[in-house]
Amino acid sequence: MKVLDYQTLYENELLEGIIPFWLKHSIDSQHGGFFTCLDRQGQVYDTDKFVWLQGRQVWCFAMLYNQIEPKKEWLDCAVQGAEFLLKHGRDEAGNWYFSLTQEGTPLIQPYNIFSDCFAAMGLAQLHRATGNEVYAQVAKETFLNILAKQANPKGIYTKQYPGSRPLKNFALPMILCNLVLELEHLLDPALVEETIQKGIHAVMEEFYRPDLNLILENIGLDNRFSDSFEGRLINPGHGLESMWFIMDLAERRGDKELITKAKDLTLSLIEYGWDSEHEGIFYFLDVKGHPPQQLEWDQKLWWVHVETLVSLLKAYLHTDDERCWEWFEKIHAYTWTHFKDAEYPEWFGYLNRQGDVLLPLKGGKWKGCFHVPRGLYQCSQTLRAIATKKESSLYQD
């Protein structure tokens, strides 16, 4: 297919398939917020509400309103989700719970800082759409709280015995690289630049290991390698997702060297994580080749492949490295063949190693209205930019 054919495919899937599915099936018109536990046809199979998925869906519909078209139904969807979050989502200290009942009663304590991250992300994007200063205030307060807790994200809810094997995890520094841009309009410019600098350093200097040309999921507080289950863990999807965050930051700074480094690391992570026998990208791997602790290590997950497509397209846009386009077409074929449901809207989330559907759900505790729509949007926009660049190049020639 030509670049613009891909662009049309991704855009149509987003606007005609994915978004109508969530609009039709996920809104709780009785209590507010979103149902995310949806079966293959979109029927609700569990009414618990997971705060990080609530925030993600607020972000998604506010983003669509801001970036694609100011549709009232998209804004209404985001606003009612945000109001549910503001009413029920936080404890008295401003920490965001992990999950709630349908009515909004807390179920699981605020142990997971990613609830905070995506609440802030959703509210900040919605502030852009509405100008509502309450959304801005809570988003900013939450972001500052995240920064204050980043050295000990789980706080009193951590299972780790103090001091025995202190490790830091890749996920939060990675998320902050993207989150800070979502809240940039609400933050002091100096804090934005400081957060960006720290995020790039953490991802590309601390968790990235030049000797492996890979990103570790956990490292010691002194940045040393830990020869343990956690220290040997590679999550190819996390590394690949982080690369498009880094490329966005590098583009902002005009740092071509950093873009090239992120492109090269994208290719290295794909080659390392690719299942040469059954295709697809592994969920977890042990950097020394030992059996991973996670029993789901060889599953193929939707978000891993969607985020990989984004990173490959951004890498190709910025560097013209044909290997990125070749991998894009290969992973596109796998993703659209295996994760896209040929009969009903939205995509499957979980495949076994062989590529067969493990769970026919379209949403649950971990999968909601986020990676697929965000990925389709990012791919569509990047494909459009690639096509424009190619057209401009031909014209100049």
Image (cartoon, rainbow, N blue to C red):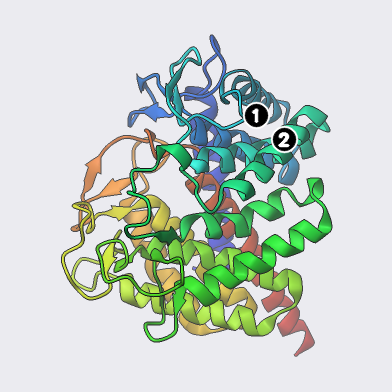
Q: Which residue of the protein is positioned furthest toward the top in this rendering?
A: 30
Residue on which the image places disc 2: 126
Of the numbered discs 1 and 2, the one sitting upstream in the chain is 1
**Any part of residue 313 in sight:** no
Residue at 76 percent across and 52 percent down: it is 184
Q: Is residue 222 left or right of residue 120?
A: left
Left or right, 268 with respect to 89, comes to left
Left or right, residue 234 beside residue 332: left
Which residue is found at the position 71% from the left and 44% from the top?
Answer: 68
Q: In this view, does 123 lie above or below 197?
A: above
- Which residue carries the number 1 mark? 78
Q: What element carries label 2?
A: helix
Q: Looking at the image, do the residues carrying marks 1 and 2 touch, with CB atoms under 8 Å apart?
A: yes
Q: At which x and y percent is residue 313?
A: 55, 69
Q: In this view, does 384 lie to the left or right of 107?
A: right
Dot 2 amino acid type: Leu
Residue that sits furthest to the bottom in the current view: 397
Q: In which quarter of the image is residue 127?
A: top right
For mark 1, give the secondary structure: helix
| Category of crowding for the residue at label 1, using alpha-carbon neighbours closer than 10 angstroms: few (below 14), some (14–19), many (at least 20) | many
One can see residue 212 in this view: yes
Q: Which of 62 and 69 is in front in this view?
A: 62
x and y, in percent, of residue 147 in the image: 63, 50
Which corner quadrant holds the C terminus? bottom right
Q: Nearer the viewer, residue 169 or 186?
A: 169
Is residue 365 positioned above or below 271 on the image? above
Indicate the position of residue 7 as horizontal and vertical percent values.
58, 59
Q: How far apart are marks 1 and 2 (CA)?
A: 7 Å
Count of marks placed on residues: 2
